[in-house]
Amino acid sequence: MVVALCGCPSPKKPEAREPLRRDPHSHAQPERVAMRHLTLDLVVDFTTRTVAGTAELQLDRRDRTADLVLDVDGPVVERVVDCATKQPLRHTLGPRDPILGHALAIAPASDCVRIAYRTTPEAAAFLWVEPAGTAGKRQPMLFTQSQAIHARTWIPLQDTPGVRFTYDAAIRVEKVEAGVRPLMSATNPAAASPDGAWRFRMERAIPSYLMALAVGDFAFRPIGERTGVYAEPSLVDAAAAELAETEQMMAAAEALYGPYRWGRYDLLVLPPSFPYGGMENPRLTFLTPTVITGDRSLVSLIAHELAHSWSGNLVTNSTWSDLWLNEGTTTYVERRIMEALRGRAYADTLWYLGRRELEAELGELPQGARDPDSRLALDLDGTRDPDDVPAGAAYEKGSLFLRTLEHKLGRARLDAFLRARFDRLAFRSTDTRAFERDVAALAPAEADRREIAAWLHDPGVPAGAPPSTSARAAELERIAQGVARDGAVDASGWNTLDWMVFLGVLAAQPVSAAQLRALDARWKLTASPNAEIARRWFGIAIKADLTEAAPAVEQYLTTIGRRYLIKSVYDALLAAGGSWRALADAAFDRARLVYHPSTRDTIAKLLGK
Ligand code: BES
Ligand code: ZN
């Protein structure tokens, strides 16, 4: 690819004028009426597992005669009034679409409507955690997960990443003991107001999928000037020690891509039922406790969620068809942050692992590398829940595309390009089309543009991607191949990444059960407290029918709810069949109420339940 960097300022801001493509996962019609500020006044009730109160929406009416159309899936709408006159407004709830939920159409009135509503206990965004599911075992907990299209299950709003709004909230918590407090993706108060409500403000415009609330017995420890961690009291010191590098990560990211624009960056460590590794809720990343390993070995996940403060939260995919813009860019930035912190060799190993993950995920698609889901720019319609779309390409092919550009353009040029986009598109939503146009300006040759188009629109991984090699990984590959001969390995001094690489390669080796037992006796893999190591080891142990691992596998599946971790273990159990399949069914039956609805749905589908 031959390219020239155009140093000239971009001539206009086309994104400001060009209407975004319609979002097939929302009923909203923001080109007519769009929300621009949300005020929540809610009561959280743990006894009924409901949230009730009002949502007030301030509007931009581009078409004064048009209805305001919202997404609602679950919330029972009790009343809709004009904020100013308090007059009831005519509104109609459309039929429920199984993926999108209902359209709530509200007749035109002033620029503010107030909706009184209550959620149902089944709201898909919520996980109500019993005291037994927490570290402290005494207080219940609640947390939300709004991405991709679950915000509509707890707030009536325009649930599309193409619409942005600011918000404030007053949250009251009913019938719980002292210590239990709410936190949001916003400015978090140190204490409740004298009237008992906790008050929150988000002054930067965000899309709905970043609406987040957690209620629990949370303590706080500062990490640095702008960073800190919330967690249950018994975990908070360990969490602060694990996450101590967060401030350095921010500095590394800012040096690359410009100022952090959200004020504080805090982290909230949730119980093991949290369905993801992390969720980039603005100002307050939600985190799985499986990162608290004691040795900071999985903190690339923090780099990832922090990176979303630029790619995703600042510049947002306008629909879920362009998830790669959020996740691919973030994965690229994550590895650049880790390179700044841990050095080139470490980052190379992350790239190596990512590449293997990509190959594995492509292999699992029905049509392999020719599968349409392996494209970066998808053309999803409303018949698929974005949660059910395999995202391997968005993360790993997306980041590999940027790495390819880095190799072709040089680091300085790619960084300047990314940074300029973060600045120019800050607090906006954008799509692959705009990205393609911008990147074309860097690559004027016809052949380059064709290559870029292939990356963005064709399935599979184009030839010409740089190899994701790592000297350390190559060494571990040789070691893993050696195990097949004598079952012995000297792993003293290995770090978690070493184990992840080694076990990944070992999984494909013809190793006997006896050799694996020798390995386990020496290195205690079945008992590994590291969820990433354990998951890979369990895959191997299940395939080799090491039945003594069964209790540890069951323990893992009934305590951890992180979807991607346990899905791979369930996959291995299904592939093994027999008593392993029975274990999968039993574990799911025991854990289903502990899992978050999104994990529960994924595993239920897998098991055919
Ligand atoms: N935003 C995602 C989680 C997500 C994606 C939720 C799509 C719902 C729909 C988050 O940033 C993420 O990517 N989490 C990963 C972290 C990992 C790649 C470091 C996870 O949970 O595993
Ligand atoms: Zn992400």
Image (tube, grey):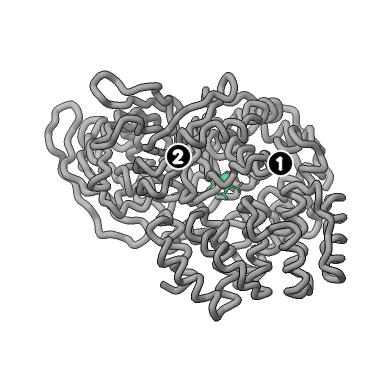
Q: Secondary structure at mark 1?
A: helix
Q: Is residue 189 above or below residue 325?
A: above
Residue 134 image offset from top left, x and y in percent: 42, 45
Q: CA distance from mark 1 to mark 2?
A: 23 Å
> Percent from the top left, x then y, of residue 518?
76, 66
Packing grade of label 2 (10 A; few <14, some 14-19, many >=20) is many
Residue drawn at x 48%, y 36% as measured from the top left: 234
Q: Quadrant of residue 227?
A: top right
Q: Amino acid at mark 2?
A: Leu
Label number found at residue 210: 2
Q: Quadrant of residue 298?
A: top right
Q: Residue furthest bottom?
A: 578
Is 490 situated left or right of 434 in this image? right
Q: Position of residue 209 (x, y in %)?
A: 44, 43
| Closer to us: 230 or 286 | 230
Residue 467 seen in this snapshot: no
169 lies left or right of 275? left
Q: Is residue 140 left or right of residue 490?
A: left
Identify the mark at residue 335; answer none if there is no mark.
1
Mark 1 residue crowding within 10 angstroms, few (<14) / some (14–19) / many (20+): many
Mark 1 or mark 2, earlier in chain = 2
Residue at image coords 49%, 76%: 582
Q: Amino acid at mark 1?
A: Arg
**Residue 400 visible in rendering:** yes
